[in-house]
Image: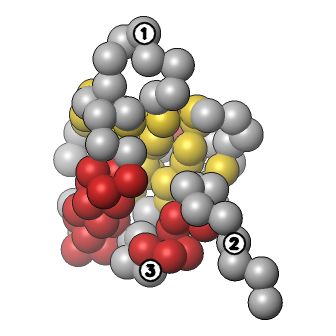
Amino acid sequence: MNSEHENTAGSDDPEVWELRLYVAGQTPKSMQALQNLRRICEEHLAGRYRIEVIDLHKHPKLAKQDEIVAIPTLVRKLPDPIRRVIGDLSNVEKALIGLQLVPASTP
């Protein structure tokens, strides 16, 4: 898995979500995270997202840039503020809350 870009948004769309997924090679957990991310984006951000996949085996210096301490980690670059979600994104509700796609439910 190289640095990979998926662009489903128009270049002048102000509502585009820029997402960066940090992985370490093509491990099952990394591949699952990418699959889950694509599904979440299609269901909740159809046509309004860009995904960049960073393989830290190939680009280890990029981990420092986004303060990556565990992998896989998803970083929401845009919209502000930057948000991070660690794990394979299999818990969709947790991922949506972490990305602020849905509000956290109040007890």
| Residue shown at 56% from the left, 44% from the top | 76
What is the three-letter code of the residue carrying label 1?
Asp
Percent position of residue 36, x then y = 30, 65
Percent position of residue 44, x then y = 38, 53
- Residue extending furthest toward the front: 106
Disc 3 target residue: 91
Disc 1 target residue: 12
Residue 83 visible in this rendered orientation of the protein: yes
Query: Which quarter of the figure has residue 106?
Result: bottom right
In the image, taking residue 56 as reference, residue 29 lies left or right, namely left
Cα distance, mark 2 to mark 3?
Answer: 14 Å
- Residue extending furthest toward the right: 107
Q: Identify which residue, 82 or 55, lies in the foreground.
A: 82
What is the three-letter code of the residue carrying label 3?
Asn
Does the residue at mark 2 contact the one at mark 3 (Cβ under 8 Å)?
no
Q: Nearer the viewer, mark 2 or mark 3?
A: 2
In the image, taking residue 100 as reference, residue 47 lies left or right, namely left
Q: How many marks?
A: 3
> Where, quadrant-wise, is the C terminus in this rendering?
bottom right
| Residue shown at 21% from the left, 47% from the top | 1
Looking at marks 2 and 3 on the same chain, the residue that comes earlier in the sequence is marked by 3
User: What is the number of the mark on residue 104?
Assistant: 2
Percent position of residue 37, x then y = 34, 58
Residue 30 visible in this rendered orientation of the protein: no
| Residue shown at 69% from the left, 72% from the top | 104
Disc 3 is placed on an element classified as loop
Q: Nearer the viewer, mark 3 or mark 1?
A: 1
Percent position of residue 90, x then y = 37, 78
Looking at marks 3 and 1 on the same chain, the residue that comes earlier in the sequence is marked by 1
Q: Residues within 10 Å of mark 2 (few under 14, many from 20)?
A: few
Q: 12 above or below 89?
A: above
